[in-house]
Image (cartoon, rainbow, N blue to C red):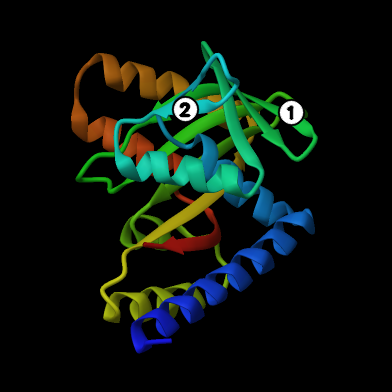
C-alpha cells in the first residue's frame, strides 16, 4: 500500500470513528444536542421539497445552509416539511413542529442569523441563533464557560478553519410581544439603526451550544 492510499484509509477510519461517537451522543438524547441539531435544521431560509420517490431535496440560498441542513439530517434531525410558517422535523421516531414568528436574516453587519419560533409541543417561544464567533460569544449568558469557547475558536483560527457558533434562549410571552411590536414599528419606518438596536436587544443573553468548524 502506498503512502497516499495508507493516509486516505487512516483518515477514513478516523472519520468513521468520529461519526460513530457523534451518533452515540445524539442517541443519548441530551437536550443541548437536540437544540444544536434543531438550530442546524431550521435556523435558515431553506425549503424542503419531497420528490415522487420520497427523497427530500433542499432549496437553499447558499451552499452553507444546504450543508448544515444535510448534516443535521445525517444525525437523524430531518427537516422534511415547510407549510406556511409551520416547520416540521423528524427526529428519530418523533415529529417536531415549530411555528416561525420572526426571521432575522443574516447581514454582513450583524454576521448572524436568528429566528424566533413557537415550539408547538409545549408552547415555548424560543430564539435560535447562529453566526460568527464575534457575533455570538459577546452575548453569552453569564456563568457559561465562554473562555473555553474562545480558546477553541482561536485554535481553529490558527488552522485557518472557520467556526460557526450556535445559541438559543427562551423568551417570555410578554417579552416577545413587546419586542415584536417595537420591531414591526421600527421595520415599517425603514430606520435601519433602530432595527439593528432591537435585534441586539433580543439577543442580549444567549445560551451557547457547541460550535461547528468548516
When asked about the image quadrant of residue 28, the answer is: bottom right
Give percent across and percent down for residue 139: 44, 57
Q: Which residue is mark 2?
A: 57
Give percent across and percent down for residue 172: 64, 34
Distance, label 1 to label 2, CA atoms, is: 18 Å
208 shown above or below 96: below
Q: Nearer the viewer, residue 49 or 174?
A: 49
Give percent across and percent down for residue 166: 48, 53
User: In the rendered view, does 100 fall on the left or right side of 8?
Assistant: right
Whether residue 113 is visible here, answered yes or no, is no
Residue shown at 42% from the left, 34% from the top: 44
Label 1 vs label 2, nearer the camera: 2
Give percent across and percent down for residue 179: 47, 28
When asked about the image quadrant of residue 136, the answer is: bottom left
Q: Which residue is mark 1?
A: 95
The quarter of the image holding the C terminus is: bottom left
Whether residue 68 is visible here, answered yes or no, is yes
140 shown above or below 147: above
User: In the rendered view, does 207 fall on the left or right side of 187?
Assistant: right
Q: Which label's residue is closer to the chain start, 1 or 2?
A: 2
Q: Secondary structure at mark 2?
A: strand
Residue shown at 40% from the left, 79% from the top: 5
Amino acid at each position: 500500500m502506498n503512502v497516499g492510499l495508507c493516509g486516505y484509509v487512516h483518515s477514513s477510519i478516523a472519520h468513521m470513528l468520529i461519526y460513530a461517537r457523534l451518533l452515540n451522543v445524539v442517541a443519548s438524547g441530551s437536550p443541548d444536542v437536540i437544540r444544536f441539531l434543531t438550530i442546524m435544521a431550521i435556523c435558515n431560509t431553506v425549503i424542503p421539497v419531497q420528490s415522487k420517490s420520497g427523497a427530500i431535496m433542499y432549496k437553499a440560498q447558499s451552499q452553507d445552509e444546504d450543508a448544515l441542513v444535510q448534516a443535521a439530517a445525517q444525525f437523524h434531525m430531518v427537516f422534511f416539511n415547510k407549510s406556511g410558517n409551520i416547520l416540521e422535523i423528524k427526529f428519530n421516531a418523533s415529529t417536531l413542529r415549530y411555528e416561525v414568528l420572526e426571521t432575522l436574516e443574516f447581514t454582513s453587519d450583524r454576521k448572524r442569523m436568528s429566528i424566533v419560533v413557537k415550539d408547538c409541543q409545549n408552547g415555548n417561544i424560543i430564539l435560535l441563533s447562529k453566526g460568527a464567533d464575534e457575533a455570538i460569544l459577546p452575548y453569552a449568558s453569564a456563568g457559561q464557560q465562554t473562555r473555553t469557547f474562545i480558546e477553541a475558536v482561536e485554535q481553529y483560527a490558527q488552522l485557518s478553519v472557520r467556526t460557526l457558533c450556535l445559541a438559543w434562549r427562551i423568551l417570555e410571552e410578554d417579552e416577545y410581544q413587546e419586542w415584536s411590536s417595537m420591531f414591526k414599528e421600527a421595520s415599517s419606518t425603514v430606520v435601519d439603526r433602530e432595527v439593528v438596536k432591537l435585534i441586539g436587544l433580543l439577543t442580549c443573553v444567549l445560551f451557547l451550544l457547541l460550535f461547528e468548524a468548516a
